[in-house]
Image: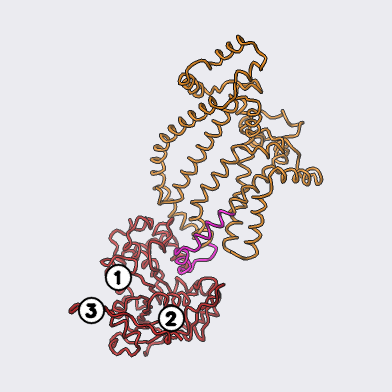
Chain colours: A orange, B red
Amino acid sequence: MTDATNDIASGERSRALLSFTLATGRFLLMLAVTIFGLLAVTFFIGRIVPVDPVLAVVGDRAPAHVYARVREEMGLDLPLWHQFAIYIGNVFRADFGNSILTSRPVVEDVIRYFPATMELATLGTFLGTLFGVPLGVAAAVKRGKFIDHVVRVIGLVGYSAPIFWLGLLGLLVFYSKLGWVAGPGRLDVTYEYMLTPVTGMVLVDSALAGDWAVFRNAVSHIALPSALLGYYSLAYISRMTRSFMLNELSQEYITTARVKGLSETRIIWFHALRNAAVPLITVIALSYAHLLEGSVLTETVFAWPGLGRYITNSLQNADMNAVLGGTLVIGLVFVAVNTFSDLLYRLFDPRTR
Amino acid sequence: MTQRSLLEVEDLRVRFHLRTGLVEAVRGVSFKVGKERLGIVGESGSGKSQTARALLGLTPPPGEVLANRLTFDGIDLLAASRRTLRALRGGRMAMVMQDPKYSLNPVMTLGAQMVETYLAHTRAGIREAKEKALAMLEAVRLRDPERVFSLYPHEASGGMGQRAMIAMMLITDPDFLIADEPTSALDVTVQQEVLRILDALVDERGMGLIFISHDLRLVSSFCDRVLVMYGGKVMEELATGNLSDAQHPYTRGLMNCLPAISGSAHPLPTLERDPEWAR
């Protein structure tokens, strides 16, 4: 049975590939427009907010001539359109200026912090999908039964319990009392500088280097925060899966599948879920993008050096270069995730091709 | 009827225990069908579709099916295991659904859906299943079977979709077919074509058929016998040859509603419904 459908599916796929390529071309144009808009928005937000970047550099006791000179050095005396042009030029040379807080180029900071967030968000979304989808399917199939109520309670707790509280509780139980996982941070201090960053994601880098001691330590560190983010997205994903599945299971084509004498397993996991997967892709992608933004609370509780914490710190210190750079990166991540989910969408739903 | 009855139904009841109370959709329906054509007519809510679904064991969840006797070829459908029922469904009994727009899986090609049916009931390989599917698409007189095979439901017209549906349901050579308003969702011009195809295939294969419709004239031209249902009960059973002998006032009312080509009917006759009949 599966061989057969694979064979047919391969035909479907080759046809899909052509329209896939066409769509990609159209998409690149859309992408350029979106990114220009993103640049404009971040730039103007940066100019409009009532924060004086000059003051942040010179301090509020600097004499007027020093203030004026720094202002000129930063290019803030130029007309706005000129500043925007310079900004775009700089962005394309991957130059976001220096961070006042860390006194490093913002790009370097982002390269340092973003992989930590990405590692955590990816693992969290993976766990959330891996458990959330089957739970949602089970809840839909056994609607109103025991398992449905269990899934509802799991989701409700995930929605309503503050994540930092769950994080602290997790640390207390699994780290402090039971000692099953490592504490805050990405690695133990002993391992901290043993790894040359390639992707910046500790799990990937240590696996690439074949350094399994570091890998195990990294797993032990990431287990709790990723489980927490996974639980958080599970709450959402399982809820949405349940409602999409209920909708699909009440459709006529499901009755047709039953008339055909197919097994319940195949009806649920193949017929219904493949249709439910279409809107589910968007839900999972959005939840992923949301985590990529950096979950400030989780990162703070677990002392995780991620983007969320970086931007929050910068904001509190009026470090506009860092804030703008970080915001732009988040914007780009959203665009990338959306693009990817749109392409997947096309692959799953023949009606959108 | 000298033929052995394939399907025997005696005092079939379908009820739904809802929060608002007990709803009885089918209330004591009895009939026997062999390899012949039985039409079931009735207005919306008369229980004709629920009767069909109960025969296939597809009464939706809160529903309950009771009967003194419900057998297919000697197999007790109420006592049969789920496995037996599944083998019967799609294998020996099939059903053509109403609207191809909703009753075909939108993310699978028509071909894949046909092949799937065949593979669920035979030990055939994919190649054989595909050949069989193409042959069936040809049997329902689709011009370019190869092309239709790789279409998605939204790419096919209503008529094409319904022919593919018929092909999909007949691919396993079932003994018995239920057609639940198979042409109601189609354009009038396409209706005739689809009916002709169904007619020819049922004849050719000597299948038993239950044809459900609200169109008395259509049913009488298509079937050997007609069951007239109202309020979940059988009002009357008639051979289509002598519809004019109908005794029951409901049947007579239905027949009076058929417009005549010559002469005008003013005022238009209205259908009389007596709550007493549904008691």
Q: Main secondary structure of the magenta part?
A: helix
Vertical relation: A281 (above or below) A206: below
Mark 2, Cα crowd under 10 Å, few <14 / some 14-19 / many 20+, is: many
The type of residue carrying mark 3 is His
The type of residue carrying mark 2 is Gly
Q: Are marks 1 and 3 in contact (CB under 8 Å)?
A: no
Horizontal relation, residue B86 to residue A106: left or right: left
The chain carrying label 1 is B
Q: Are marks 1 and 2 on the same chain?
A: yes
The image quadrant where one finds the N terminus of chain B is bottom left
Vertical relation: B213 (above or below) A294: below
The mark found on residue A311 in the picture is none
Residue A166 spot, x, y in % from top left: 72, 46
What residue is shown with label 3?
B266
User: Could you tell me if residue B124 is visible in this image?
Assistant: no
The chain carrying label 2 is B
The mark found on residue B197 in the picture is 1
Q: Nearer the viewer, residue A109 or A310?
A: A310
1 or 3: tag closer to the N-terminus: 1
3 or 2: tag closer to the N-terminus: 2
Inter-mark Cα distance, 3 to 2: 28 Å
What residue is rendered at 46% in x and 67% in y?
A255
What residue is rendered at 46% in x and 82% in y?
B73
The type of residue carrying mark 1 is Ile
Q: Nearer the viewer, residue B276 or A343?
A: B276
What residue is shown with label 2?
B231
